[in-house]
Amino acid sequence: MTNKIEINLKSIIFDFDGVIAESVNIKTNAFEDLYKPFGREIAKKVIEHHKTHGGISRFEKFKLYHKEFLGIKLTNPQIKDLANQFSELVVQKIIDAPFVSGTLEFIKNNYNNYDFHISTGTPENEIKIILDKKNIRNYFKSVYGSPTLKKDHVKTIMSENFYNINEVIFVGDAESDIQAAIENGIKIIFRTHSDNLFLPKRYDLIEVENLINLEKVINNINKNPLEKK
């Protein structure tokens, strides 16, 4: 038996890469560049893992890739050095990357209607710089990045703002976004693209190809109550 919980949306949590900016491939190319010196097969394994594990901190990925694919246990200074190299490869390109269709318009038109938050696997100091350079940071009530996990971002956002589960929705494009929403009992709108088409088959998701019709999708969600067992 299920109970209906009326939707009363107050807040939207956005992932960044692939949701606000068309920047997913920028990071894929950066991982490839960093691992190409170890050979084509290693780089291929890295890219395959990265594409199927979006939203996970680059620090965790560096540790995993070196250990699993190269048999190397990285020290913290080595991880930091790789992260710095990665940042040099991606930050300006992400600043220059176009917005996902519909995203900027939705944010500008609705920032007074909802509390907007960012939850991303990008390092927190880096995402704040990117948001500043893209002139959109002021639209967001809070910004969270790595090393904290997205599920913990959501938990903190809900706790600090006293949101109920029917008042928050996550807009994401990675499995880490889906898990963050599931673990906190909130709905997710999932932006599909070429690198994540395998994911919707595993979950019951509200799918969109871009964010042009985000307002319409949200209005439909508002009319349909959550089911709680």
Image (tube, helix red, strand yellow):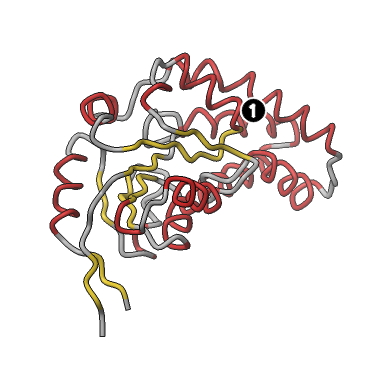
Question: In this image, 207 relative to 58: left or right?
Answer: left
Q: In which quadrant will I find the N terminus?
A: bottom left
Q: Position of residue 85 (x, y in %)?
A: 70, 23
Rendered residue at 39%/42% (across/down)? 13
Mark 1: amino acid:
Asp
For residue 49, above or below residue 137: below
Q: Is residue 195 above or below residue 97?
A: below
* Residue marked by disc 1: 33
**Percent from the top left, x then y, of residue 195?**
42, 44
Extreme-bottom residue of the structure: 1
**Residue 76 in which image quadrant:** top right
> With 44 as the anchor, is 66 left or right in this view?
right
**Residue at 20%, 34% in the rendered image:** 212
Q: Residue at x 71, y 24 (%)?
A: 84
Q: Residue at x 68, y 32 (%)?
A: 36
Residue 164 in percent (x, y) is at 36, 57
Under circle 1, the secondary element is helix
Q: Nearer the viewer, residue 95 or 228?
A: 228
Q: What percent of the width, then of the height, locates residue 100? A: 32, 30
Q: Residues within 10 Å of mark 1 (few under 14, many from 20)?
A: few
Q: How many marks?
A: 1
Q: As drawn, is 196 to the left or to the right of 41?
A: left
> In the figure, residue 41 lies in which quadrant?
top right
Q: Quadrant of residue 80?
A: top right
Quadrant in which the C terminus is drawn: bottom left
Nearest to the observer: residue 169 or residue 158: 158
